[in-house]
Amino acid sequence: MKVYIIFLFLLKFSFSQGEGGENVEVIGHLEFGQNTSDITGFFQDGREFAAVGLQNASVIVDITDPENPFEITRIPGGNSMWRDLKYWNRYLYVGTEAEVDNGIQIISLDDPDNPFLENTISSIGSSHNVHIDEDGFLYVVGSSDGCDIFIYDLNNPANPELLGCWNGEYIHDLEVFNNKAYACGIYSGVFYIIDLADKTNPQTVLSYQTDSGGSYSTHDAAVTFDENYLIIGDESPGAIISIYDISNYNNINKISEYYTQGYSGNGYLSRSAHNVYIQENSGLLITSFYIEGTRFVDISDPYNPLEVGYYDTSDDDLASENDPYYGNWGTYVDLPSGNIISSDIENGLFILQYNNAPSELTYSPSSFSFESTSNETIVDQIFVTNTGVDESLLTYEITTSPFASPLDGPNENDFYWTDSDNEPSLDFNWLDISEDGILYNFVNNDESGSIINIGFDFQFYGSVYNQLIINPNGWIGFGEDSDEWNNISIPSNEAPSSAIFGFWDDLNPINDNCNQYCSGNVYYHSNNERMVIWFNNVAHWWTNFENSFYDFQIVLYSNGDIDLNYSTLLGNYEDATIGIQDQFGSSGFLISYNSNYLHDNLSIQFKQKPEWLSIFPTDGELVSNSTEAHQIQLIPSSLDIGVHYGYFLLNSNGGTGFVDVSITLGENNNLLIGDINFDNEINIQDIVLLLNFVLESDLPTNTEFFVSDINADNLLNILDVVQVVNIILSNF
């Protein structure tokens, strides 16, 4: 589900021709020696990339360092000025209007440094555009090969399955969101809304004749994330961008228009829009506008679109009154960094940064430190202020986190992760078990040995485990074993499930069927607080990995935390899967897949969101020179005696920050035995909680265990329930 976050910028701008722009700057640029067409971007293995269509190839560019982009490779294809590209699940799908060597190319990006053409949908010849929706379905339009819209299932991404076909008229482009296609009949000026709930049988819900009929009209569309408004870009000389209210299909209305400066009442023929996009994290309309470059438009009030920034990538003098088709072809707007990438036909790749920051986030205090006991609730406040320019609007949100600098999260199970390179509170945390570790034995170098006890109940993706297996290929699991030595990306149901991958690859520790190259043992040690699994200088399978040895740990903690610690890595250590995934292979964190990420003395940590820490409200808007108070609450009843840490993360259009929170819990000598919910009463609610502990549907904290063990026998059972009942009866 997309989230529509609105930013309102109340600024006035003056515009100039040529390079340079308002509130937007170029932070990277790369030329390719030939004309470009469309562009897409993707984030994979901790890196950002651009894929750009050239006259005779698709080029992959590493833009992780936006100031120093570099070309990785070119995948040749048929010669054409039209080339459209979309990314999905480590593959790139490329359509073209080439007369020969056409079809839909499927380019493997499993190793983004070594892409290759894996397959081609040859049943489709030429095409104009491809689109992939949020659920992984591919749509191909602008083809003369039997369907106006082809629909493919990408469940097997290298071999798509044709599901359905829609015919009505030539479709130039479309957007698909929430099982509906917004399709553009470029020659008729009609846009269609098509129901895709059954992709084998798509049904037209609406066809609407715009007022821009004629050649190169109704070029492409973008729908707002609430699906109430449709933005239509037209492409004829002097064309404009129109916004339609589609909230009532029986009453479609054009409510506003957007055009660049220089437009007059009868049009400014040397200007023309090309492609329209809505940025997910800001809600801004961002447009590739041929010779007008990349345009940023605030549509938070769709009745009054407001241009808030631009950068002109183009050479304006190339265009003539009736031929505006030079300059900015395409734009990709949803990279995690927030950077915008644009393809200029003549001038190549531009990496842009939108710098409009009229608002400024400040907050106080910068930290909290509390001392308490587990049955006390603490309430306090954070104050957020907009100290930006007059009339600015600060839009912000506040989240709770176990880290000041998480690298990702939360996922479906409220996991976050970070590493010691990024997190100020996390140091390299190697745990020495060299004297206490127990040797783990393997039958061969691909199969786990015996099942071993963890030593405590370990919660992982909603399940509780007290046993695990250790696989010689660098992972531990809580389900079935796998002898798969060839690592793949995760999450995947083809990978070991319910597993933690410290270094999943073809390792070769000492085992009962050793060859001459096996080396290194695996040890484990557990107490009631943590379990350590140590791969002690374990060798990689020798072929192509000569003299490669790895010294690393997987650490499980009784509170559900996970550490991956890497001490010494020798040889080639870039060919591995690092991360975690659930029992279904559907959810997880991929930290690294066959990439240059690891190094000596590195710790990775996974934690869940601190449930004991909350804030209200979680977001807000502030005009300049105003302040909002947010109430925080700490409920430490689930915590054990000791020191605990959490963070409030603040994100806004005026900056980011974090507030660290620590709480030190001491012994409470006034704990009431039997008062399991800490409300200073013993009643039926305490019996319910105790029964949950006895039946093991819930796990007590140390403090909860103390007040639940009525007879002090270090066991929770029916005898304790009887005791609580007797206490309640005696009070009547």
Image (cartoon, rainbow, N blue to C red):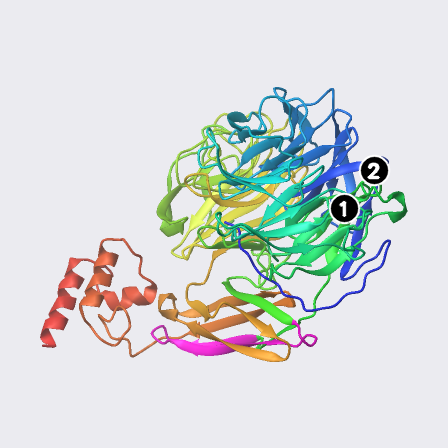
Q: Magenta includes 84?
A: no
x, y percent for residue 560: 43, 54
**Mark carried by residue 272:** 1
Q: Is residue 53 visible?
A: yes
User: Residue sitting at 57 percent across and 55 percent down?
Assistant: 418
Figure quadrant of residue 121: top right
Mark 2: which amino acid? Phe
Mark 1: which amino acid? Ser
Q: Magenta includes 378?
A: yes
Figure quadrant of residue 71: top right
Residue 4 horizontal side relative to residue 373, left or right: right
Crowding at dot 1, Cα within 10 Å, few <14 / some 14-19 / many 20+, comes out as many
Tell me where the magenta segment starts and ends, as one range: 367-392
x, y percent for residue 502: 54, 43
Q: CA distance from mark 2 to mark 1?
A: 24 Å
Tag 1 secondary structure: loop
x, y percent for residue 81: 78, 31
Residue 170 horizontal side relative to residue 177, left or right: right
